[in-house]
Amino acid sequence: MKKIRFGAIHADYITQAEALEYIIDLAKSGKGGYIVTPNIDHVVLAQKNRQLRNAYAQASLSLVDGMPLKWMSALVGEPLPEKVSGSDLVRPLLQRAAISGLRVYFLGAASGVAQTAADKMISEIPDLNIVGVDSPPLGFEKDPKQEQATIDKMMSTEPNIVMLALGCPKQELTMHKWHKTTAPIVYLGIGATLDFIANKVKRAPSWMSDMGLEWVYRISQDPKRMLHRYLVRDAAIAPIFLKMLRAKKSDIVFWN
């Protein structure tokens, strides 16, 4: 598959329809794996986080999440076909999972959010088989006993697909750490999507997302946390993009 480098990580040239087919086929195959969804913040964080870079390098699929990266690919002359946000992918993926008889598990978000999201999805997709939910406490991954208990609870339900809502970089590092020992599970890192589904956090209107203005909406919803992320930390994307503009295409576009 054709890929494009954004700094130290990459995104795949794939449409949402193709991504849905790929994930369902992967879940049916029994091989296991995990799906990442890069955005500007992931690109910036990966510059200084070797573990995050390793997680991206071994991902089964990398779906560009956000218009800014799509625009960057176009400006270097190698446009990605479309934005494939994790939040946009979840509902159609759950619909396909229901049709295919696949077992789904929700893991992450604050206490009660995963269950609320599961109840809502089951009401929308009656044939959907959500076999379990779990919202482990903050920092569970740092306690070996708590982490193992979380894995054991998940594995006991025998899921095919796990929607992992822990945020970056925790969810990427967790998928990378778990995917080999928990196969045939296929993980999808979905960030705040369970909060969106459960209506705990409002998502930006589609027109803002399509115009690359979702960050403006998120700042308005949570200025204390998001102002620093978008206006300070993510400003580091500028030198990364300038380096892409100056690079040879053979250095930023490759095939696996």
Image (cartoon, rainbow, N blue to C red):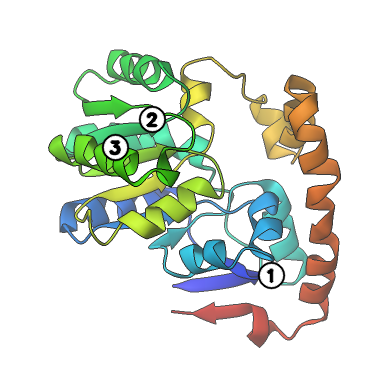
Task: Report crowding for label 3: few under 14, some 14 to 19, many 20 or more residues within 10 A (C-alpha).
Answer: some
Q: Position of residue 103 (x, y in %)?
A: 19, 36
| Quarter placement of the N terminus | bottom left
- Decide which of tag 3 and tag 2 comes sooner along the chain: 2
On residue 136, the disc is 2
Task: Report crowding for label 1: few under 14, some 14 to 19, many 20 or more residues within 10 A (C-alpha).
Answer: some
Whether the residues at callouts 1 and 2 have beta carbons within 8 Å, the answer is no
| Quarter placement of the C terminus | bottom left
Q: Nearer the viewer, mark 3 or mark 1?
A: 3
* Left or right of 29 in this view: 148: right
Task: Report crowding for label 2: few under 14, some 14 to 19, many 20 or more residues within 10 A (C-alpha).
Answer: some
Q: Residue sitting at 21 percent across and 56 percent down?
A: 183
Q: Quadrant of residue 253?
A: bottom right
* Left or right of 67 in this view: 148: left
Mark 3 to mark 2 CA distance (whole Å): 7 Å
On residue 7, the disc is 1
Q: Residue sitting at 57 percent across and 58 percent down?
A: 81
Label 2: state its secondary structure.
loop
- Decide which of tag 3 and tag 1 comes sooner along the chain: 1
Whether the residues at callouts 3 and 2 have beta carbons within 8 Å, the answer is yes
Q: Amino acid at mark 2?
A: Pro
- Decide which of tag 1 and tag 2 comes sooner along the chain: 1
Q: Position of residue 109 (x, y in %)?
A: 46, 28
Q: Check disc 3 and report the residue beneath it.
A: 150
Label 3: state its secondary structure.
helix
